């Protein structure tokens, strides 16, 4: 179902979705109250919910819609503004499954928006189906634990990432004694708001990385939107560097340059946590880390919205463990303490 107060946007999104033969748009609504009426008449797997609407806005409707259909996955459609980012990420903490940055009417035909939207809708639908099926996918050979404890935890994520990050960081709490670097594929408007929401979880503090700053233990340094986050070795520690080099894997920030630089700076003593995401960004960087003596842990398919990035390193045989999201934090903490 599509819930948006713009008839033009509803029509454009419906055409995008139905260009994929796996998707059927069963209902459309112009505000949250209409959406509540429609889900009583239709079986809806995924709802695209606009935030700003008359009568009943998306944030007001969100908890009511979740109560009315607990199995339905809700994707918030947010404008590319600071306020839109704040509301979208607050909605994720309130139970929305994901978000899409909504383009203007003039930009709605943009192919990158279409790709992102289709990936999230089909990924969330498959996620629900996989949970019912309960069949884990095959994984290539599992690698042994590292000989030396890591100096750095490096996290990569994309589609479905914010919700996964909230779960992982909350579970890690204050048990991380090394610096953390994080690349999440996200627009520049959204990354400072993501950092604020991660900090509010009450474990590690998180902020956009600044060029030249020292990486601090128990602190998450987040790649700013539209800049690659790199790691450099300096006397006495590690330093963040920001780069405007061309996108890699169609992304800036990208996970691969972060991991390659982290491997060089830490002499291979890097622990990689690869979360849900579309594509294979992070594969070559993880390959470099593992070749240098580091370790990788990937989120499993059953709990990933899209098993692209974690699946790529799992199927390449680069992982020490492939785990459901709730089991990743204990494993990471054990590896950071020199265990298996």
Image (cartoon, grey):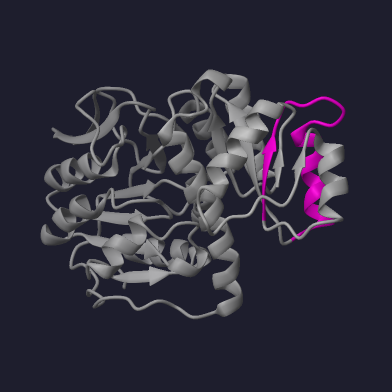
Give the number of callouts: 0
Residue 69 forms part of the magenta stretch = yes
Residue 143 forms part of the magenta stretch = no
**In this rendering, would 2 be left or right of 196?**
right
Q: Start and end of the magenta stretch? A: 46-70
* Residue 330 percent across, percent down from the top left: 45, 66
Seen in the picture, residue 322 relative to 73 is either above or below; the reply is below
**In this rendering, would 316 be left or right of 192?**
left
Query: Quadrant location of residue 216?
Result: top left
* Residue 115 percent across, percent down from the top left: 44, 42
Which residue is located at x 42 percent, y 34 percent? 111
Query: Quadrant location of residue 229?
Result: top left
**In this rendering, would 224 be left or right of 114?**
left
* Residue 80 percent across, percent down from the top left: 54, 23
* Residue 157 percent across, percent down from the top left: 40, 48
Which residue occupies the foreground of this view, 87 or 154? 87
Q: Which quarter of the rendered picture does the C terminus lie within?
A: bottom left
Which residue is located at x 24 percent, y 50 percent? 151
Query: Quadrant location of residue 48?
Result: top right
Q: Is residue 177 visible?
A: yes
Seen in the picture, residue 90 relative to 293 is either above or below; the reply is above
Which residue is located at x 49 percent, y 22 percent? 107
Seen in the picture, residue 334 relative to 190 is either above or below; the reply is below
Which residue is located at x 87 percent, y 38 percent? 33
Which residue occupies the foreground of this view, 126 or 291? 126
Which residue occupies the foreground of this view, 16 or 216? 16
């Amino acid at each position: 179902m599509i819930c948006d107060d713009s008839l033009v946007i509803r029509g454009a999104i419906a055409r995008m979705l139905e260009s994929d033969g796996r998707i059927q748009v069963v209902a459309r609504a112009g505000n949250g109250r209409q959406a509540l009426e429609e889900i009583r008449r239709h079986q809806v797997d995924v709802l695209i919910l606009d935030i700003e609407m008359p009568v009943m806005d998306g944030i007001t409707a969100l908890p009511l819609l979740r109560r009315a259909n607990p199995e339905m996955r809700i994707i918030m459609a947010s404008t590319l503004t600071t306020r839109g980012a704040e509301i979208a990420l607050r909605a994720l903490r309130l139970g929305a499954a994901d978000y899409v940055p909504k383009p203007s009417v003039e930009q709605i035909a943009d192919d990158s928006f279409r790709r992102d939207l289709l990936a999230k809708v089909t990924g969330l639908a498959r996620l629900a189906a996989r949970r019912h099926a309960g069949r884990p996918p095959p994984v290539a050979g599992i690698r042994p634990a590292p000989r030396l404890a890591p100096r750095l935890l490096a996290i990569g994520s994309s589609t479905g990432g914010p919700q996964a990050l909230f779960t992982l960081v909350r579970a890690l709490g204050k048990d991380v004694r090394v610096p953390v670097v994080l690349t999440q594929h996200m627009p520049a408007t959204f990354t400072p708001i993501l950092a604020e929401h991660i900090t509010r979880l009450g474990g590690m503090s998180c902020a956009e990385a600044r060029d030249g700053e020292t990486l601090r233990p128990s602190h998450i340094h987040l790649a700013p939107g539209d800049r690659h986050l790199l790691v450099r070795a300096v006397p006495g520690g590690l330093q963040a560097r920001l780069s405007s080099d061309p996108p890699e894997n169609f992304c800036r920030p990208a996970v691969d340059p972060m991991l390659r630089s982290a491997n060089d700076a830490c002499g291979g003593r890097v622990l990689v946590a690869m979360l849900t995401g579309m594509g294979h960004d992070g594969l070559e960087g993880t390959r470099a880390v593992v070749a240098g003596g580091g370790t990788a842990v990937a989120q499993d398919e059953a709990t990933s919205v899209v098993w692209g990035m974690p699946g790529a390193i799992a199927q390449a045989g680069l992982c020490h463990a492939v785990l459901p999201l709730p089991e990743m934090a204990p494993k990471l903490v054990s590896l950071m303490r020199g265990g298996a």
